[in-house]
Image: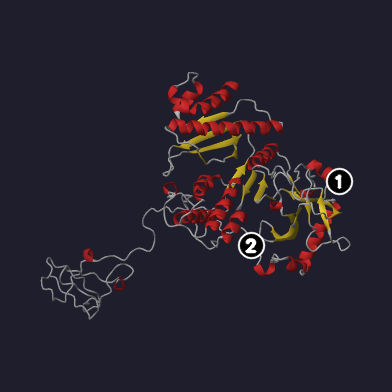
Amino acid sequence: MSMPIPVPPCTIPINSTNNDTRVPSSTFSPNNDLSIPLPTSSDGLPINPSVPSSLPNDPTSTTIPLDKTNVIPTPSVGRTHQMKTRSQSGITKPKAYLATRHPLPESLIPTEPKSLKAALSDPKWLATMNTEFKALTNQKTWTLVPFTKDMQVITSKWVHRVKLNKDGSLDRCKSRLVAKGYLQTPGIDYEDTFSPMVKPVTVRVVLSLAVHNNWCVKQLDVSNAFLNDTLNETVYMQQPPGFVDSSKPDHVCLLHKALYGPNTSLINHFISALNAQFSLKDLGPIHYFLGVEVYRDHHGMYLNQSKYITDLLTKVHMEGAKSCPNPTSFISKLSLHDGDPFEDVTLYRSTIGALQYLSLTRHDVAYITNKLSQFLQAPTVKHWEACKRLLRYLKGTLTEGIWLRPTDNLHLKGYTDADWASCIDDRRSTSGYLMFLGDNLVSYWSAKKQHVVARSSTESEFRALANAATEVQWLLSLLSELQISQSKPPVLWVDNQGVTALAANPVFHARCKHIEIDLHFVRDQILAK
């Protein structure tokens, strides 16, 4: 015989519509039994009721049949199924280093003087000017001669800079006397102009050879190196501002040596000989060179420009911007006439110029920088947005660079490619190549817009191959000068069957007459090997 169980007053809702008789978990004991007092017999033992065969149809009934099949058990606290986390599987997210240095507060960094009066009134800048002037006189850079009316005299000025280390700390304050060369007349005061500067490819090749041969690379700073070049022309300059000879105030300087002309060396066993000729400062093993941070261990040498990128972000007021994982989302769709004109043209041009210097260590931004540099004449707001997206990408990849590792051989090989008619304004193609010395990437000025419109993908690929062949010839001459011989001919890889057929086939095709020069140049290089 079944009997109903009286239910004490409670706040358990009973849905009469869908017969929902769920009970909160708080009303259950740990063994999933109802915590409801049951009736007892005369001897104090609980009576086990039986479940009725049919449920009551009256929705207002206050009796609940005790059927454990209708009771939702309390969820188990422990794990009841097999689970494997990402950390257990060895899947980890790469760390993103967004800050690699701790710059000094602005209050601790000396202020660069903007005028001669401000520099002369500051003891530390006056000391740097005296050091520079003493170096100029010791090198016999000029002699004082009386002024005549037929002299073409140029003026000079002082330039002051605060030099910082790669970690943002103060290195030194430096003053330099520069001549205003723009006042000279071509053909009278000078014939040619030239600024000697080492090519980035040369730096990477030399460092790659140092890693391959386990050489120790020393870094030297030649004090006043620009004073060691003798002038061939007659140049007159006014006496330096603030350092006029009181006994000869009307005299001018007849320059004997140039105020610019780098003269450096990186070979360790020449230090003593160089020190006898020049005033040298030994900076120890190479660590910061031409804005490139150098880290070396037993695995090789790592080059990056994190400080340079951080300074660039600060210059454009983007040091607090969020990083961006992909800078090329819409770069191929940019056009000359896309968007409203950008107001600050100088800011856009200076930023793109600064980005081009990143080619020393960042080959991943070469194509994007080349694309953005095509709009220097009249940039738009959309072009500047693409530039800022690239800067945000650089912020998230501050420590990215290139590895130079010991390699089994020094064979020269290259890879070349071109995107046919990619520019939506004039349908010109962009050439690209990568050059490896062994396993080390040494040359990747890989984004140059072709000068003519290619009428086929074969034509655009062949022009890219011709540019790469020219780079190979230059690298061979550089290696020859460094006394590095190649045991076998260099190899150029190209992914176009038409190009490989034309390069190897001696039969001239009339349909390729417009690329005949590049065709014969590449073919001559193949036959020469």
| Residue 7, x across and y down, in percent | 21, 78
Rounded to the nearest whole Å, what is the CA distance between mark 2 and mark 1?
Answer: 38 Å
Q: Against 11, is 343 above or below?
A: above
Front position in the image: 301 or 36: 301
Disc ID at residue 444: none
Give the total number of marks visible in the rendering.
2
Q: Look at 43% across and 33% down and name the residue there.
A: 457
Q: Most extreme residue toward the left, as rendered?
A: 57
Q: Against 483, is 216 above or below?
A: below
Q: Residues within 10 Å of mark 2 (few under 14, many from 20)?
A: few
Front position in the image: 40 or 82: 82
Residue where numbered disc 1 is placed: 276
Q: Residues within 10 Å of mark 1 (few under 14, many from 20)?
A: few
Q: Secondary structure at mark 1?
A: helix
Horizontal side of 1 relative to 432 (left or right) equals left
Residue 223 in view (yes/no): no
Q: Amino acid at mark 1?
A: Ala
Horizontal side of 169 relative to 453 (left or right) equals right
The quadrant of the picture occupied by the C terminus is top right
Front position in the image: 449 or 173: 449
Residue where numbered disc 2 is placed: 102
Q: Amino acid at mark 2?
A: His
Q: Look at 63% across and 62% down and name the residue there.
A: 102
Q: Secondary structure at mark 2?
A: loop
